[in-house]
Each structure stands twice: as C-alpha cells, then as structure tokens.
Image (cartoon, helix red, strand yellow):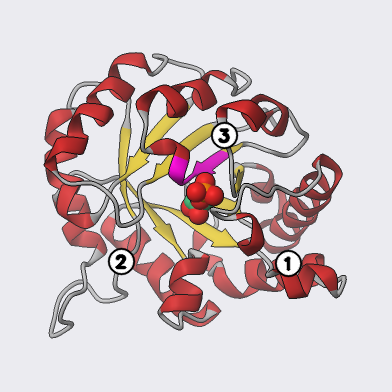
Amino acid sequence: MNAPTPLIAGNWKMNGTAGALAEAQAIKAGAPASGVRVALCPPATLVERMSRALAGGGVIIGGQDCHAEPSGAFTGDVSAEMLADAGASLVILGHSERRAGHGESDSDVVAKVEAALRGGLEPIICVGETLDEREAGRAIEVVTRQVRGSLPASLAGKAFTVAYEPVWAIGTGLTPSSDDIVEIHQAIRATLREMFGAGGDGPAILYGGSVKPGNAAEILGLPEVGGALVGGASLKAADFLAIVAGAPKA
Ligand code: 13P
C-alpha cells in the first residue's frame, strides 16, 4: 500500500485569541497546495473564526478534544457535532494533557473516538509513555497497550491518525533518538495491523514532542513517521511552515 499523505498538525493548546488569526492566515498563505496535509487545531473559541478566515485554502481545522455525547447537561464541554458545525473536520483525542490533567482513561478515549466518527470528524488519537515508563524499559508495552485500549473496532475502514507523543518530550525541548522513534512507530504499525489487518497499513502515525524547524526534516524522514503533531512551534507561522517544508512529499 502507498504511504499515507503526511499530515502536519498544529495543536495550539490553550493559546490564541482573535489577534492570532493573522498567524493562521500566514500559514494558509504559505502551505503547499498538495503532497502534505496541513492542519491547525486552535482552542474551541477560535474554531469557527479560523474556519471562516481560512475558507477556500488547504488548511484543515480541528478541535483539541470532544465530549462523548452529542449534546446535554455537560457544562463546559463541546461535542464532536458542535466542532463539525463550527467548521472542524479533525479532532485530537487522548492527548496526554487530557489523560493526565483530566483523568481520561483509554475507555474514555474510545467513547470520544466513537463520538468523533458519529460527528463526521477524523480523530487523531494520542499515545505516549512517561519518563518513568521509558526509564523502566516499558515504553513499547505502554504505548501498544494504549493503542489497543484507545482505538475502537469501529475505526476499521475509517480515516484516522495515531500520534506518538512521549510525555517527557512535550514542551521540554527533548526528543527521543531517531532509533527510539522508529522502534515505537514500528510497534504501533504492527499493533494497527493486528487490530485492523491490511487496513492497519493506511493510517499515518505522527510523531509529537518538541518538533521544531531544526529537527523536523530528520524526524519526518524516518520510516513509519507519517507526519507531526506540533505544539509550541505551531503558534508562529514561520516556524510551522518551516516544519511543513521538512515533510517528505507524498
Ligand atoms: P510541543 O511541540 O510544544 O512539545 O507539544 C507537542 C504536543 O503536545 C502536540 O500535541
């Protein structure tokens, strides 16, 4: 099967108000027209405005989380249907900041993935080990368990992406060695094949954690690395576009 089209997705986390839309416009202006998918996942308050501001360009808009239910008495939450209504077509799920900061379990992530599919959103499902787990030699075991536990069987035949984000590499400037990234990505691919058969070859597996202009081309050129999930460096158009430029063209 052909390699999936690389996806470079910016996760703005809890950053950005109206003034930041100028950076998004600059990303739209500089994004390549083909060969790589470019996405921005702003905070929920900006999803609709960013969708309008970037309409007609190639940049895909995504949310950073969604509730498992379509609507109801869930104060402060946003559903997949609401994100889609606001112009999103992707959603990040199971980010380690949600798992650690909001107590999300693998089964919570499964319910959210089901919600994303119901709402017509393509999920980006995040997995990754902590430093303690890596130092204990448990990274592969932890990550493959998260993949098995967080991806419902209903993903078969659907568009989705897995993002490997070692917790200790997020926002720290640290990255795993190239060999360590490849080892984990290959383990994720093998797990996807176990779960989905030949369909496990299709989804891109992104790397996330301190991706910067200076390391992007090397990381993005590694076997089984199908793109990047970028935090801090996605807030500045010049940095994000330099990362996008490092992606091998499909
Ligand atoms: P940084 O790129 O800031 O390390 O964040 C990575 C991340 O968590 C993306 O989801």
Kindly tell me whether residue 30 is visible in this rendering: yes
Using the rendered view, name the quadrant where residue 164 is placed: bottom right
Residue 111 picture quarter? bottom left
Residue 73 vs 118, above or below: the answer is: below
Under tag 1, what secondary structure? Answer: helix
Q: Disc 2 or disc 3, which is closer to the eye?
A: 3
Badge 3 density bin: few <14, some 14–19, many ≥20, Cα 10 Å: some
Task: Return the residue at label 3.
Answer: 212
Q: CA distance from mark 2 to mark 3?
A: 27 Å
Which residue corresponds to the image point at 45% horizontal and 44% vertical from the top-left? 232
Q: Is residue 29 left or right of residue 207?
A: left
Res. 132 image quadrant: bottom right
- Residue 231 inside the magenta-drawn segment: yes
Measure the alpha-carbon separation of dots 1 and 3: 26 Å
The residue where tag 1 is placed is 144
- Between disc 2 and disc 3, whose residue precedes? 2
**Quick check: 60 left or right of 140?**
left
Q: Secondary structure at mark 3?
A: loop
